Amino acid sequence: MVEEFSTTQSQNKISNCYSITISKMDSKTNCCKREAAYCCNSGYLARKDSRAQLLDLRLRVQRSAANVDDSMRLINRLVAALSELLSMRSVSGILHTCATLDMATEHSQKCCEELVAVGAVGTLLKLIRSVSRSIPDQQVLKHALSTLRNLARYPHLTELIIENRGSVETILWEFLRNKEEAYFIASDLLKKICQNQKGVEAVHNLPALLRRLHNLVVELGKKAGNDKSYTRNLVTKEQAERRLRVAAELLELITNSGGQRN
């Protein structure tokens, strides 16, 4: 009898605990449902109240777009700045314009196409040929090459760059003689050019510069392997190895593409 009574008590306790747990779960569920309903209703009321404000905002934007000064549009301002680039005398002004062109062409294909259509490639190449070795001019060179690199992201524009007289020679020459950041930008640009068959042919039509590229790879390889100063200066060593790797990759790309051409 005692055992039966104990068993009955245990079962009753378990049953009570289960009932309490179920009750709590139902309570939480109902609470969540009420909160969800409240949120939905609040969202509906907020959207309803702001409908007039959104309509007013939309109309104001449309009026602003209709009355905008066409000369103040970004692309038109870029075109105007490009047309004045070669006549500028202030290095800071030239640098600012080139940096703006670089940024705009990095983010907009339409800007790239519009600028190429108004002769940006020829203007930038003339600018590249005219810069000196001074630090400000090298900053100008960096942005000019970077802008051309941005244009070359699009195959149909790459072909227009290649077709511009002396373009490949100018870019390859800057790559060979530069030791700063412009070296790597010119390398990226040349790789894009060499992905086009006309670009490969243009490079192979410059045997003197091609020999210099080969000699550069050999020279950088010797320096990276023999110069003991590189082992003392880790940054210098990494920079030299990076320059070697970039030059070797470019030479290999040109050589392999030339083999396919033949």
Image: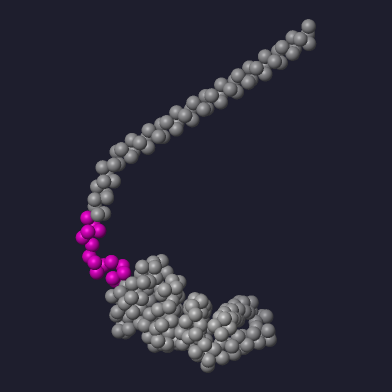
Going 41% across and 83% down the picture, which residue do you hit? 163
Question: Observer-nearest residue: 76 or 2?
Answer: 76
Residue 31 appearing in the image: yes
Residue 192 in the figure: left or right of residue 238:
left
Residue 194 on image: x %, y %: 51, 79
Question: Observer-nearest residue: 259 or 180?
Answer: 259
Going 42% across and 31% down the picture, which residue do you hit? 37
Question: Observer-nearest residue: 109 or 230?
Answer: 109
Residue 234 in the figure: left or right of residue 104:
right
- Dominant SS of magenta comes to helix
Q: Which residues are magenta?
A: 63-77
Residue 239 appearing in the image: no
Residue 45 on image: x %, y %: 33, 35
Residue 168 on image: x %, y %: 46, 84
Q: Is residue 92 above or below residue 58?
A: below
Going 76% across and 10% down the picture, which residue do you hit? 4
Number of numbered discs: 0
Question: Observer-nearest residue: 125 or 143?
Answer: 125
Quarter-of-image position of residue 10: top right
Q: Which residue is at the far top?
A: 1
Task: Let me know if residue 109 is in the magenta part.
Answer: no
Quarter of the N terminus within the rendering: top right
Q: Which residue is at the far bottom?
A: 208
Q: Is residue 1 above or below residue 26?
A: above
Q: Is residue 5 above or below residue 127?
A: above
Scheme of colours in the image? one colour
Residue 219 on image: x %, y %: 62, 88
